[in-house]
Amino acid sequence: MLKITSVQDEQMQPVFYGFIIFPWGVSKALSLVACPLKGFDCIIGRDVMMDWNFIYNGKDGFITICD
């Protein structure tokens, strides 16, 4: 269990272990924490993004992810 702090409150939530896998085969083992989200399936944190180069092109509506 891990304490999750949000704008609304603090909650103890379970921790799971898994992988994030991209279609081109790159993967990363990570800890996953369950928490209630409104309008999202998941949130990817900086602890994951620090391993890749993310480029967001808002004008054209796409994201490029490089290892």
Image: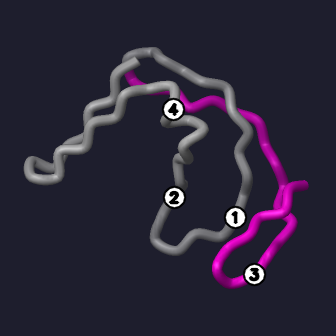
Q: Is residue 55 above or below residue 13?
A: above
Q: Secondary structure at mark 3?
A: loop
Question: Alpha-carbon distance for marks 4 and 1?
Answer: 22 Å
- Viewer-closest of 49 and 40: 49
Q: Kindly report which numbered mark, 2 or 3, lies closer to the viewer in this rendering.
A: 3
Disc on res. 43: none
Amino acid carrying label 2: it is Asp
Q: Which residue is mark 4?
A: 50
Which residue is identified by label 3? 9
Amino acid found under the numbered disc labelled 1: Cys
Give yes or no for residue 25 being in the magenta stretch.
Answer: no
- Rendered location of residue 15, percent (x, y): 82, 48
Q: Which mark is residue 35?
A: 1
Q: Residues within 10 Å of mark 1 (few under 14, many from 20)?
A: some
Residue 22 locus on image (x, y percent): 44, 26
Is the magenta region chiefly helix, strand or loop? strand
Q: Which residue is mark 2?
A: 41
CA gap between label 3 and label 4 equals 27 Å
Disc 2 and disc 1: Cα gap in Å? Answer: 10 Å
Disc 4 versus disc 1: nearer the observer: 4
The residue furthest left is 60
Label 2: how many Cα within 10 Å (few below 14, some 14–19, many 20+) = few
Q: Is residue 10 magenta?
A: yes
Residue bounds of the magenta highlight: 1-23
